[in-house]
Amino acid sequence: MFTYTLRRLLTAIPTVLLISLAIFMLLEMAPGDPMADVPLTIPPEVKAKMREALGLDQPSWVRYLLWLKQFFWVEPLHLVDHWFGTAFSTDMQRVMSWQTRSPVSELIIQRLPQTLWVVGMGYVVGVSLAIPIGVISAYKQYSWFDQVGTFISMVGFSVPTFFTGVVLIVVFSVNLNWFPSIYDTTLVVNSWPTFVQQVKQMVMPITVLALYNAAQISRYMRASMLDNLGHDYVRTARAKGMTEKVVVLIHVLRNSLIPVVTVIALGVPSIFAGAIITEQVFKVNGLGHLLINAIQSNDLPLVQTLTFIFAVLIVTFNLIADVLYGILDPRIRYE
């Protein structure tokens, strides 16, 4: 297992570098000019100096290598300096946002808690609902619970999250006035009323994300349970006099969770990409909102860094899913 994990890590390094190059080239070929919003009254020589300050006068390969150096060398050194009080990254150029002229890493750290709080809770709630729904639907196949669960899962999986979010806003915010339609990221929870307000503004975005995730994972859970319920070891356990609760929850559920856990691990990076739309609908000031604003303002360093982080998450959790599958299933042996 250690050899396989090390080999996958070494394979991931060129994969990540190729992804970073692909992202950089796509952004280079994309239409738009970072200086497009500059007033026309500014003289050409001033515009030329502004382009030089942004590094746009340099060749593409120079800017790409500079970004690699800043992302993989300067930014980690800055974290070391911040944690241990050293001065390794003094006078080193960091990845800077063209729009705000502030370090990209600081912008990401500022927005990350909102995304993790809303999106992470949505994924946790979705997984917590999907597993019992899938187990009950498989055990009581073709029952009314299975039929209702299948219908809700199909609706939740097929309807896009932005449409579900708009429907919830119209029903529960506009008509019933139960929950706020806009997420207040400046809210400080320091009392019971502010805690209630925080919970109320989290209900709708978490519901949208949880419905989508639960619909997908519950289908995998149901299919895996149905596959294991027909195996010989289930009949053997029942023949030995084990209770139905022990057979289902101990033997069948444990084996059924093996492929589902890998699906859950692979789904973690996708929730950040899916949250881009949800954050826009509910005005959550997270990473998705930051990425959309960066795209609209042609802030290429910020767009490149965010999309690269999303890509690294996908590669990382693919590796984690493969390792987890080998740990959970004793039949799988990596050489």
Image (tube, rainbow, N blue to C red):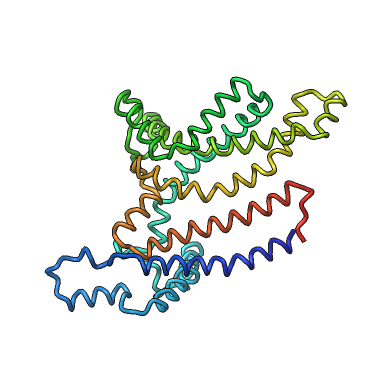
Where in the figure is residue 276, as x and y percent of width and height? Answer: 40, 48
Q: Nearer the viewer, residue 280 or 231?
A: 231
Where in the figure is residue 200, as x and y percent of width and height? Answer: 39, 31
Residue 65 in the image: above or below residue 292: below
Task: Assign the N terminus to one quadrant of the image.
Answer: bottom right
Q: Residue at x 73, y 64 (%)?
A: 3
Looking at this view, name the residue that lies furthest to the right: 240
Q: Residue at x 85, y 23 (%)?
A: 241
Q: Residue at x 53, y 32 (%)?
A: 153
Task: Assign the C terminus to one quadrant of the image.
Answer: bottom right
Where in the figure is residue 64, as x and y percent of width and height? Answer: 43, 74
Q: Residue at x 64, y 64 (%)?
A: 9
Report which quarter residue 283 is drawn in: top left
Where in the figure is residue 296, as x and y percent of width and height? Answer: 30, 57
Q: Is residue 154 left or right of residue 132?
A: left
Residue 52 in the image: above or below residue 205: below
Q: Is residue 36 left or right of residue 12?
A: left
The image shows a total of numbered marks equal to: 0
Looking at this view, name the residue that lies furthest to the top: 144
Q: Is residue 195 visible?
A: yes
Q: Nearer the viewer, residue 332 or 206?
A: 332
Q: Is residue 190 visible?
A: no
